[in-house]
Image (cartoon, grey):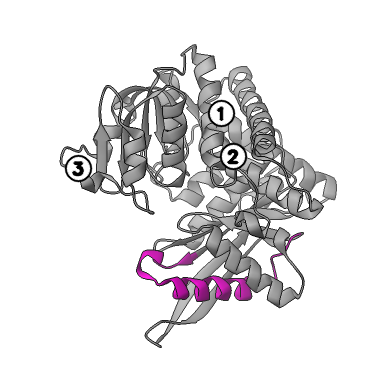
Amino acid sequence: MVLMTENLNVLQATQLIIEDALTRLGYSSAMVELLKEPMRIMTVRIPIRMDDDSIRIFTGYRAQHNDAVGPTKGGVRFHPEVTEDEVKALSIWMSLKCGIVDLPYGGGKGGIICDPRKMSFRELERLSRGYVRAISQIVGPTKDIPAPDVMTNSQIMAWMMDEYSRIREFDASNFITGKPLVLGGSHGRETATAKGVTIMIDQALKKKGIPLHDARVVIQGFGNAGSFLAKFMYEAGAKVIGISDAYGALYNKDGLDIEYLLDRRDSFGTVTNLFKETITNKELLELECDILVPAAIENQITLENAERIQASIIVEAANGPTTFEATQILTDRGILIVPDVLASAGGVVVSYFEWVQNNQGYYWTEAEVHSRLQEMMEKGFENVYNVHITRKINMRLAAYMVGVRKMAEASRYRGWV
């Protein structure tokens, strides 16, 4: 089946690949209809009193893709460009991530249309609490468990947990993940996505026969995932030759001084504005390297630039950075792609660990968290890679097939389809 997704929005493109994956697995058109959209989505309006005493109304969303396997799970993003279709697509991707690493979850995702960079600390607190009040009827430790996402953090999770505890009148540490350690957070949660990407890089390098030491790495994006990944790669002896943020990119063929850049970056991952000699994000993506890690925004590698990509391996730390057509071109050129739904699953794995620890009241060391994360991520990689090889399909479609099967089987056993 030939898929054309280049001119579709993120939800439509995702739905086409879901349909292809389910059809190849032998499921009915009814299963496709069930799984191509979230089972429920709530749109909420949140009135917030701003610091100047004016009232501003914010729009928020919470999508729950499928709860046949268990409660839904997924982050909440604060961003001025959040859309309903984006939240829907992200909830489907969360389902796929959970299926790939075999978690007892379906996918969920939330978002609020706002710009936290232009809001005060207290305004953010009021918005966080207002969002929880608005969605409180459909979330909970056994229903839907939120987590941090774009421009949200452990402080915002703490406010949300506290508000939910007030509404339900019991301690609700297991309502949300990504919390501060003192409120039941897990060791390793802040670095989980980057740790997972690091594990995927290691597995992909082994398949290509490339040693990690002195491997040339380019990272697009220097936020949470990108900056921690740069740190881990630098410490492992790889050469991080390029990094970028929203304003441009830095390049040094002999390797950048990552410790210096980490020290200078601001809380939003901006650092290139401190340098005069920069290159564009477009030029960064086309640098000759062993490993390219898109860790910024979607649709960065497309039909337009796929032929000029010079990496041996692409590991997607961001959501949807490579279009499906570009994926096929790169695969045909022999470039190994570790797709987003696999590569960035480390975050939800450690969120699951946090939820388990909250439920048990027993907490693990950082070493235990990393060991269990490594085991689950490596198993997920092997499952996807084996489908890629045996079915002779690209890694993205293979990941969708592995990820969607658990949901489809659970829905079938429940008698839904």
Numbered mark located on residue 346 in the image: 2
Q: Nearer the viewer, residue 193 or 342?
A: 193
Q: Check if mark 1's residue and mark 2's residue have beta carbons within 8 Å.
A: yes
Q: Which quadrant would residue 310 be assigned to in this image?
A: top left
Give the Cα separation between the discs numbered 1 and 2: 9 Å
Image quarter of the N terminus: top right
Give the Cα separation between the discs numbered 1 and 3: 31 Å
* Kind of residue at badge 3: Phe
Mark positioned earlier in the residue sequence (1 or 2): 1
In the image, farthest residue toward the bottom: 53
What's drawn in magenta, residue-wise? 112-141
Say left or right for 268 vs 155.
left
- Which residue position is annotated with label 3? 275
Name the residue located 26 percent from the left edge and 39 percent from the top edge. 249
Q: Nearer the viewer, residue 407 or 30?
A: 407
* Kind of residue at badge 1: Ile
- Horizontal and vertical percent position of residue 240: 36, 28
Does the magenta stretch mainly form a helix, a strand or a loop? helix
- Horizontal and vertical percent position of residue 220: 36, 38
Numbered mark located on residue 227 in the image: none
354 over 252 or under it: above or below: below
Give the Cα separation between the discs numbered 2 and 3: 32 Å
